[in-house]
Image (cartoon, rainbow, N blue to C red):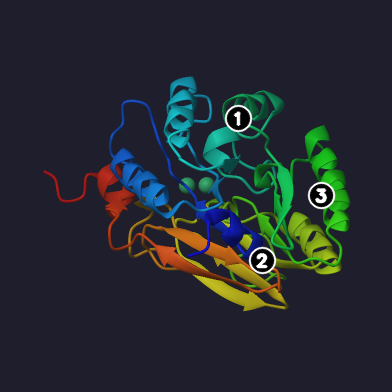
Amino acid sequence: MPTDKNRSMKEFRLIQVADIHLGAGQEHHLDNWTKVVDWITREQPDLVVVNGDLIMSDPDNDKDHAFAREQIARLPVAFRCLPGNHDIGDNIVSGHMPKRIDDTRRARFIQHFGAERWAFGAAGWGFVGINAQLLGSKGQTAEAEQWDWLEQTLNGYRGSPVALFMHKPLFLDHPTEPDYEDPWTRQSCIDSVSRERLLELCKRFGVRVISTGHKHQTRTFSFEGIYYLWAPSTACVNSAPTMLHWGTREVGFFDLRFRPNGLFDYRLIGPDFLFRHENYIRKHKVGRN
Ligand SMILES: [Fe+2]
Ligand SMILES: [Fe+2]
């Protein structure tokens, strides 16, 4: 049997969890998170990426940030986090939530969960995580810094396959789609100007995989040389079944293996053992008098 060390030289095994939505004093997503931690403890992957929406809902709820940090610290392996709209506020241009990204909220995230963007190499791949909430910020200094950092970082991995992680998807139907007028649909992905700029970088520097969260729906597809992964939430399914959905309404997370030959594969974990909390039932008390 190969040791874990030997295995990691051959492949890099990464678990992506997203939209874990943990809140202090609120038990209804903690049951699933405990099952996820138990599964990861058994499997001992190389790394866990927590891809945004770590806290329950309100970006300014300090208790929720502290609680989510405690819970994420239960992970038995190394982890890296990225911010989502519920952690630091929504995007300025394309967001919908009343609270939007600013430097104070970014600083709170960094204090609790570490860097808002990161990069490292493993198994011949480059792994890059960015703050999706900064895209379309209408001129915030931090956005310009992130664009510069991203270009330099991708240039550093030139010639290697790259997997990019960020909270929000790039588009819903097609990379050339305009920004949606309906605010709820528009907030589902990043704005069209940022998307065009990001895709130009991805194609120039060999990004092969873009893995996102946010939609609480599973969807995977390949388009123009990039493999897109929409990870489900570990916590809950959003929106009533009658609404338009682009992916599968289920809970779970992704188990990914990256190989030095540039290939990767993955599997969906969890729909069979996580509870499928339906957020719209809880919010609207469907089925209760
Ligand atoms: Fe979410
Ligand atoms: Fe989100």
Give, as a three-letter code, the residue at label 3: Leu
Which one is in front in this view, the residue at disc 1 or the one at disc 2?
2
- Residue under circle 2? 209
Residue 169, how many percent across, how many down? 61, 59
- Residue under circle 3? 150
Q: Earlier in the sequence, mark 1 or mark 2?
A: 1
Give, as a three-letter code, the residue at label 1: Phe
Provide the secondary structure element on which disc 3 rests: helix
Q: Is residue 183 left or right of residue 238?
A: right
- Residue under circle 1? 109
- Residue 26: name its quadrant: top left
Give, as a three-letter code, the residue at label 2: Val
Q: Nearer the viewer, residue 15 or 21?
A: 15
Q: Earlier in the sequence, mark 3 or mark 1?
A: 1
The reply to whether residue 186 is visible in this rendering is: yes
Cα–Cα span, label 3 and label 1: 20 Å
The reply to whether residue 181 is visible in this rendering is: no
Residue 55, how many percent across, how many down? 46, 35
Q: For mark 2, does the 10 Å Cα neighbourhood hold few (<14), some (14 to 19), or many (20 or more) residues?
A: many
Q: For mark 1, does the 10 Å Cα neighbourhood hold few (<14), some (14 to 19), or many (20 or more) residues?
A: many
| Tags 3 and 1 touching, CB below 8 Å | no
